[in-house]
Amino acid sequence: NNLRDLFASDFRVGTALSNRSLSGSSPELVSLVQKEFSAITAENAMKWELLRPTLTEWDWQKADRLVQTGEAAGMQVIGHVLVWHSQVPDAVFRDASGAPLTASATLARMSEHIQHVMDRYKGRVQVWDVVNEAVDEGNVWRKSHWHTLTDGAYFPRAFEVAHEADPAAHLLYNDYSMHIPEKRDFILQQLTRFRRQGVPIHGVGMQAHVHLEDPSIAELERSIQAYARAGLRVHITELDVDVLPKAYEYMGAEISKSFAYSDALNPFADGLPQKVADQLARRYEQLFRLFLKYRDDIERVSMWGTVDGESWKNDWPVRGRTNYPLLFNRDGERKSAYHAVANLK
Ligand code: XIL
């Protein structure tokens, strides 16, 4: 059996493909993905700086390969991501002389990008993360170039342009920490306001980069309920469970990102102790039990990667750690966490 069939009547189970897999260098991993999952996302390939390194150069190779890989196995293909403050060249926000764009020029550049990317995959990519991470710590709009250059106008406009480009596409607002009550309430308030004005926002993506104990199931549950009650479809878009000590600390509203590697931040370099593997399996079991409880509201649960060795969590926020956040080990074998999830069915 496999996850896609086990959960077929509940929600899609998806994963993300790394650039390495999309460059054709791990065909076994791609077959594993096609066998186990019913949705795929590009971990990086559709981000602005990879798709379009300069304003005049496009590199579609890996993105095309993602779409073909999904279609070949009857999977849903998710577009990630159209508008984000990260992994986007600085030149996007400047004119030919290097001066910052005006508001209308910024909106035009964003719209042109959305239209061009969505046109290429019209009818083949069914779901888009239209805007990613627009809300910052402290529950305010993130002061990204998109936001500051357009005084916030970019947000609703992105959805309107995406809807025009492909009226059949399902459009998401995607973010992390979607469970934190203050952030959740801010997002709900804004999305509800825009939706009342007719802005086509169909669902939310809860990234779900979680830890072994944090956030609590109860907090996640309250958030799923709140988004669903507001009429939004819920997608769990980037699930992984970090088993390592937290390398960052919340310092007021700011996250300090200047860490250096230390052995204390890499306690499982020689393998995951049984006790932690058990904890991880229980954590996954509880998470999927929650998702099953809300199967009517949840459209999809996507992992942010397939095998532990390829997870971004080995390198974030500190390089060179050995993490175990996913359902398959470094050899592509099912972990106890996988079985804990599968056994729920
Ligand atoms: C991450 C990728 O996994 C890394 O390979 C890359 O270096 C940085 O981005 N939120 C998102 C994803 O929406 O696009 C990010 O992916 C993880 C956090």
Image (tube, rainbow, N blue to C red):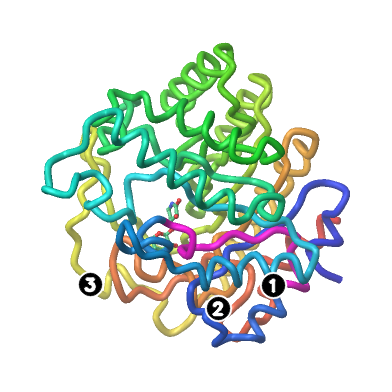
Residue drawn where x is 33% and y is 56% of the image: 87
Q: Which residue appears at 74% of the width and 33% of the height?
A: 297
- Which of the numbered marks, if any, corresponds to residue 262? 3
**x then y, percent, for residue 81:** 48, 50
Badge 2 marks a residue whose secondary structure is helix
Q: CA distance from mark 1 to mark 2?
A: 10 Å
**Nearest to N terminus: mark 3 or mark 2:** 2
**Which residue is at a point 48% across and 26% down the rendered structure image?**
184
Q: Quadrant of ligand 1?
A: bottom left
Q: Nearer the viewer, residue 136 or 76?
A: 76
Q: Position of residue 41 (x, y in %)?
A: 59, 59
**Segment colored magenta:** 33-47
Question: What mark, if any, has residue 138 been given in the picture?
Answer: none
Residue density around tag 3, few if under 14, some if 14–19, many if 20 or more, within 10 Å: few
Q: Is residue 101 above or below residue 43?
A: above
Percent position (x, y) of residue 76?
72, 56
In 3D space, how far apart are the residues under numbered discs 3 and 2 (Cα atoms)?
A: 30 Å
The residue labelled by disc 1 is 33
Q: What residue does disc 2 label?
A: 21
User: Does ligand 1 reach within 8 Å of label 2's beta carbon?
Assistant: no
Q: Amino acid at mark 2?
A: Ser
Residue 100 horizontal/vertical position (percent): 16, 39
Looking at the picture, which amino acid does disc 3 mark?
Ser
The local crowd at label 1, few if under 14, some if 14 to 19, many if 20 or more residues have their Cα within 10 Å, is: many
Is 132 magenta? The answer is no
Give the alpha-carbon distance from disc 3 to disc 1, as whole Å.
33 Å
Element under disc 1: helix
Q: Are marks 3 and 1 in contact (CB under 8 Å)?
A: no
Q: Please name whichever residue, 100 or 70, is drawn nearer the observer in this view of the structure.
A: 100
Label 2 neighbourhood size at 10 Å, few (<14), some (14-19), many (20+)?
Answer: some
- Name the quarter where the C terminus is drawn: bottom right
Marks 3, 1: nearer the viewer? 1
